Image (cartoon, rainbow, N blue to C red):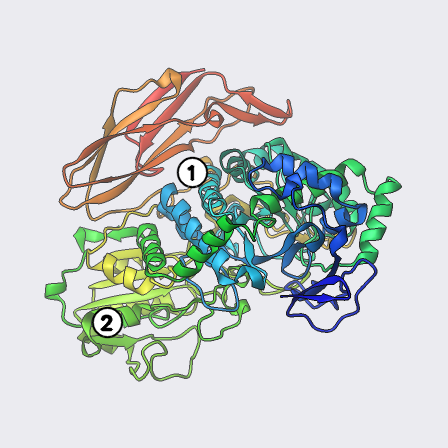
């Protein structure tokens, strides 16, 4: 709202009384942020002299003008102090807020599987599920929907939201990384393509992504005080590659720096790292994580552009302007930071919130907020991401006509994973937590599908509510003994896996335990419980709610079917029923390799200095880690060291069958085609994957294979279609540490095409 007071325009948004400084900016008392660092408050007050405002016909005010022209026009109109204000957030969770030039205050919200706000939203599956779809059109649709909900959750006049913190694109170097569920798996191409699709979806509705965490934030242990070093080849080919792909393919608007240091410098201070990002053609903003700025001078000189989680402060802005004038802060870095931040604000429409076009968009998004259409997309995401790992003798799908009684056993049968019911975000994943409007548990879905009288509930043990004798999501439904329930049922659905007590952001600063997952095992006594249940009822399906690989070695042989559902969002229970009974056909593929033991991953065989790191008594960082495993991450490491996986990367079964065969191709031009035929009796979706084996060049070892292209195709029974794959230039080059750059390989590049990293029947050879 606005009030005229003594010729001044007073812009107010739910503020507490504060003293207004000389620049008309409130002095805000800082509050504690998620990492225990001062962040300030969303509340603010600003006094603006109407006569100081640029004219209404100023070029930058015209949304029809090119963004670069608008940026340059506004740059000439800002005072040095106002420019300084643009490199700091306006409150704990917002930026912008310069009313003199018509700049709205823009909220920044956590994601990426739902917009976290103080009102319930649509709850989508976790980010790792997006990668498991291998369907970039669907990922873009999911993100576009998330963007619309971001715009709608707070009305513009209430300080509307235009930025979602995500996607995360850090690499799953270890299966124990506690935030793997927020990321896109172990392969840089799949991760980068998924991130690009996600960013395109958000940006299509003027919501800025903030792609994170740049870079090498691949674990939670000591992440705020950890100094990470990595061989250059691994940095360029593995860890930076997803960001590069997303920047080049989606033109990402903003990136968030990581908490950890890189080679002796905080990420936000590292010109080496931030200039690498710029070298990809990145023209967007580089935000610090909350509390990860560590000083204006080193951060701005190092290439970061915006301090997150701070508050408006006129004295600081004057000091920054003086530091620029004296050369303490590099003028070129400072001006570049302001331009990048303004560019992002223009892109997200922060200057255009009062235009008719923006208001019409906003109204449409508010009408569709939490709509049935959004719910259908959440359900489609849950279905498309599920990965069928085992289906002995075609045990699935189940025949509804032959099943009367179902036993729902295991801790995830009645467990919610969102903040529904008022659970704190720290217990639901940290920044990945979502306040859901609804969440259908497996128990709820089966009771709806079969009737309460035909469902037996027996959690065996619980992650939460350990003293309850009945169900939480279906109140009054008694909990039975699991063995007795299994004995009485026609089929057992064991809902197991993990919860967010293990898969979560570690909140706080320094060395905090527990941090990452302690081991590969299912949480608690699930392995033994599965074996006990399967012993009395071999018709047992295991459905795994997980965010990363787990060990199945102790119980996999005892059951005929295993289905991975990830954290499947608000429609997870309904999706599970649809999948198990054949209404939907599983089509997801693994974005991870499932090993048989933890030592299958190279970083877990090389000592603590390689993972998780070691404490150090010297320097500003209390822990250090060196990625001596190099490029041998995920399936590359399994291949290199001849470790046989339990389930290979890219693997996933279907209720139908597919045949992949050669089609006319042009290998020397880098164009490969295959025929894909549905040879079964059901419609289904197949993911065609292309891997390359590069020749050893200049004495450098190459992976046995690496993913270079993929495509998704849906076919009716008997239908055949030609799929074209065009690998990127990375298929023909490698990063040379000797030459400090990309170099072409020399010799025969062998391309293999199939439906998983372990099943590649089509082969082409290209001479380089």
Which residue matches tag 2?
448
Q: Quadrant of residue 743?
A: top right
Q: Viewed as shown, does residue 361 lie left or right of 70? A: left
Secondary element at image label 2: helix
Query: In the figure, is residue 577 to the left or right of 266?
Result: left
Q: Which residue is most to the left? A: 401
Q: Residues within 10 Å of mark 2 (few under 14, many from 20)?
A: few
x, y percentage for residue 472? 37, 78
Mark 1–mark 2 CB contact (< 8 Å): no
Q: What is the x, y in percent for residue 346? A: 60, 44
Write the residue at 25% across / 25% down.
662
Structural distance between the alpha carbons of marks 1 and 2: 47 Å
- At x 71% / y 38%, what residue is drawn? 336
| Depth check, front residue: 46 or 369 | 46
Q: Residue furthest right?
A: 326
Q: Nearer the viewer, residue 109 or 623?
A: 109
Q: Residues within 10 Å of mark 1 (few under 14, many from 20)?
A: few
Q: Is residue 571 above or below residue 81?
A: below
Residue marked by disc 1: 642
Q: Position of residue 288 (x, y in %)?
A: 67, 51
Q: Kindly tell me whether residue 640 is visible in this rendering.
A: yes
- The quarter of the picture where residue 453 lies is bottom left
* Quadrant assignment for the N terminus: bottom right
Q: Which quadrant, please, contains the C terminus? A: top left
Above or below, 135 against 415 in this view is above
Could you tell me which secondary element the residue under label 1 belongs to?
loop
Closest to the camera, between mark 1 and mark 2, is 2
């Amino acid at each position: 709202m606005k009030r005229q007071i003594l010729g001044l325009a007073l812009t107010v948004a739910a503020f507490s009384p504060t003293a207004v400084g000389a620049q008309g900016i409130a002095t805000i008392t800082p509050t504690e942020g998620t990492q225990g660092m001062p962040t300030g408050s969303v509340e603010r007050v600003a006094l603006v002299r109407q006569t100081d405002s640029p004219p209404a016909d100023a070029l930058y005010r015209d949304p029809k003008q090119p963004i670069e022209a608008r940026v340059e026009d506004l740059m000439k109109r800002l005072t040095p102090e106002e420019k300084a204000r643009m490199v700091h957030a306006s409150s704990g969770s917002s930026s912008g807020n310069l009313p003199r030039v018509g700049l709205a205050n823009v909220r920044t919200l956590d994601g990426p599987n739902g917009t976290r706000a103080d009102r319930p939203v649509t709850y989508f599956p976790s980010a790792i599920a997006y990668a498991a779809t291998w369907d970039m059109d669907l990922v873009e649709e999911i993100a576009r929907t998330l963007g619309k909900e971001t715009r709608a959750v707070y009305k513009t006049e209430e300080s509307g939201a235009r930025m979602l913190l995500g996607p995360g694109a850090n690499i799953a170097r270890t299966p124990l990384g506690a935030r793997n569920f927020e990321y896109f798996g172990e392969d840089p191409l799949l991760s980068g393509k998924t991130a690009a699709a996600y960013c395109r979806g958000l940006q299509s509705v003027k919501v800025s992504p903030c792609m994170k965490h740049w870079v090498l934030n691949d674990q939670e242990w000591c992440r705020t005080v950890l100094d990470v070093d990595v061989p250059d080849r691994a940095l360029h080919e593995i860890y930076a590659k997803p960001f590069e792909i997303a920047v080049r393919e989606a033109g990402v608007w903003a990136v968030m720096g990581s908490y950890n240091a890189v080679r002796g410098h905080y990420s936000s201070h590292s010109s080496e790292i931030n200039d690498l990002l710029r070298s990809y053609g990145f023209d967007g903003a580089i935000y610090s994580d909350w509390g990860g700025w560590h000083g204006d001078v080193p951060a701005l000189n190092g290439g970061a552009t915006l301090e997150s989680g701070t508050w408006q402060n006129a004295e600081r802005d004057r000091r920054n302007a003086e530091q620029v004038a004296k050369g303490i802060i590099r003028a070129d870095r400072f001006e570049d930071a302001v331009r990048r931040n303004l560019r992002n604000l223009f892109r997200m429409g922060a200057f255009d919130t009062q235009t008719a076009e923006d208001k019409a968009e906003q109204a449409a998004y508010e009408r569709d907020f939490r709509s049935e259409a959004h719910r259908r997309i959440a359900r489609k995401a849950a279905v498309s991401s599920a990965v069928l790992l085992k289906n002995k003798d075609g045990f699935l799908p189940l025949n509804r006509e032959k099943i009367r009684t179902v036993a729902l056993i295991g801790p995830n049968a009645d467990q919610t994973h969102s903040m529904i019911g008022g659970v704190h975000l720290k217990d639901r994943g940290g920044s990945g937590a979502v306040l859901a409007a609804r969440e259908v548990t497996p128990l709820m879905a089966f009771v709806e599908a079969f009737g309460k009288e035909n469902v037996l509930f027996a959690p065996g043990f619980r992650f939460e509510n350990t003293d309850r004798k009945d169900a939480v999501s279906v109140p009054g439904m008694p909990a039975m003994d699991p063995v007795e329930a299994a004995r009485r049922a026609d089929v057992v659905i064991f809902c197991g896996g993990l919860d967010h007590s293990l898969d979560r952001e570690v909140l706080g600063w320094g060395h905090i335990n527990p941090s990452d997952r302690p081991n590969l095992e299912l949480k608690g006594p699930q392995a033994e419980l599965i074996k006990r249940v399967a012993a009395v009822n071999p018709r047992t399906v295991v459905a795994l709610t997980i965010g990363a690989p787990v060990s199945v070695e102790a119980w996999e042989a005892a059951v005929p079917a295993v289905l991975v559902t990830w954290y499947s969002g608000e429609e997870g229970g309904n999706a599970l029923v649809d999948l198990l009974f054949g209404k939907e056909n599983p089509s997801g593929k693994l974005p991870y390799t499932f090993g048989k033991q933890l030592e299958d991953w190279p970083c877990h065989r090389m000592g603590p200095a390689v993972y998780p790191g070691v404490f150090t008594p010297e320097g500003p960082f209390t822990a250090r880690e060196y990625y001596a495993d190099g490029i041998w991450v995920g399936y590359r490491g399994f291949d290199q060291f001849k470790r046989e996986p339990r389930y290979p990367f890219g693997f996933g079964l279907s209720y139908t069958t597919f045949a992949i065969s050669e089609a006319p191709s042009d290998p020397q031009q880098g164009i490969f085609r295959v025929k894909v035929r549905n040879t079964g009796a059901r419609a289904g979706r197949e993911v065609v994957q292309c891997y390359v084996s590069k020749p050893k060049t200049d004495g450098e070892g190459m992976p046995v294979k690496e993913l270079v292209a993929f495509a998704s195709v849906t076919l009716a029974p008997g239908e055949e279609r030609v799929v074209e794959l065009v690998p990127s230039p990375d298929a023909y080059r490698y990063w040379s540490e000797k030459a400090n750059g990309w170099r072409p390989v020399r010799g025969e590049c062998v391309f293999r095409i199939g439906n998983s990293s372990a099943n590649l029947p089509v082969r082409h050879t290209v001479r380089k």
